[in-house]
Amino acid sequence: MGGFCFIIHDIIEANGGRKMVKVRLYLVRHGKTMFNTIGRAQGWSDTPLTAEGELGIHELGIGLRESGMQFERAYSSDSGRTIQTMGIILEELRLQGKIPYRMDKRIREWCFGSFDGAYDGDLFMGLIPRIFNVDHVHQLSYAELAEGLVEVDTAGWAEGWEKLSGRIKEGFEAIAKEMEEQGGGNALVVSHGMTIGTIVYLINGMHPHGLDNGSVTILEYEDGQFRVEVVGDRSYRELGREKMEEKNNL
């Protein structure tokens, strides 16, 4: 699962002599990969975007550009698929080399340990549900799922809920605070489906499942607090697809 972007609007207000800025983070799930296509759990393992995946991210980048989006900074995890996704978006936005971009391993996907690369069905609809005696993994909380992965991971690489949620929260907070320190504005952030779902859950308790590749989830950050604005928005991709079809029909 997996992608993500941030947008930040400059709003400066007086607050006891302290300047406040509002930050909006646009979190993008990376483009569709080889493992996404054949239904394998990707985690900390990595495969490149397929041709279909690249096309979807070109659509997203065009849609963001046509919407007049402006970004001051860009961030991604250190996984190849998010770096590849970011490169395509920045190309379409004509921002390559023009805005700061850094990678942060704290916003990587969940690690599935010895089950990285396993078939989704075997892990999420077979082994994990059997451990908890449920019909489907979506009946479990994120915390239960994380602890279940630790239980079945024979390599000892999977993270327990406290460590997993802590590093994800820390990673996104660090990005938001860095943006705040730089005066606010808009940030583009490319991450992963379950990681984006986790930060949404930590903010408002919502438990999103199956965020689409190239979808956009928007977080607002102000005065030390996150707020979820939108989850899994596909409208930018759809706009980009329309623009590409118009150009091809000329």
Image (cartoon, helix red, strand yellow):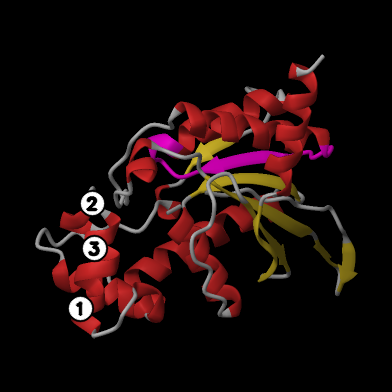
Give the residue furthest to the front: 249
> Quick check: 75 above or below 100?
below
Q: CA distance from mark 1 to mark 2?
A: 19 Å
Vertical placement of residue 5 versus 66, above or below: below
Q: Amino acid at mark 2?
A: Asp
Q: CA distance from mark 1 to mark 3?
A: 10 Å
Classed neighbour count for the residue bearing mark 2: other residues with Cα under 10 Å, few (<14), some (14–19), many (≥20): many
Q: Nearer the viewer, residue 202 or 221?
A: 202
Find the magenta span and give its range: 67-81
The tag earlier along the polypeptide, 1 or 3, is 3
Tell me the quadrant of the picture where the C terminus can be found: top right
Q: Does any portion of residue 98 appear in the rendered image? A: no
Number of residue marks: 3
Tell me residue 242's x, y (percent). 76, 33
Q: Residue furthest right?
A: 14
Residue kind at label 3, given as amino acid type? Leu
**Residue picked out by circle 2:** 116
Label 1, on which residue? 130
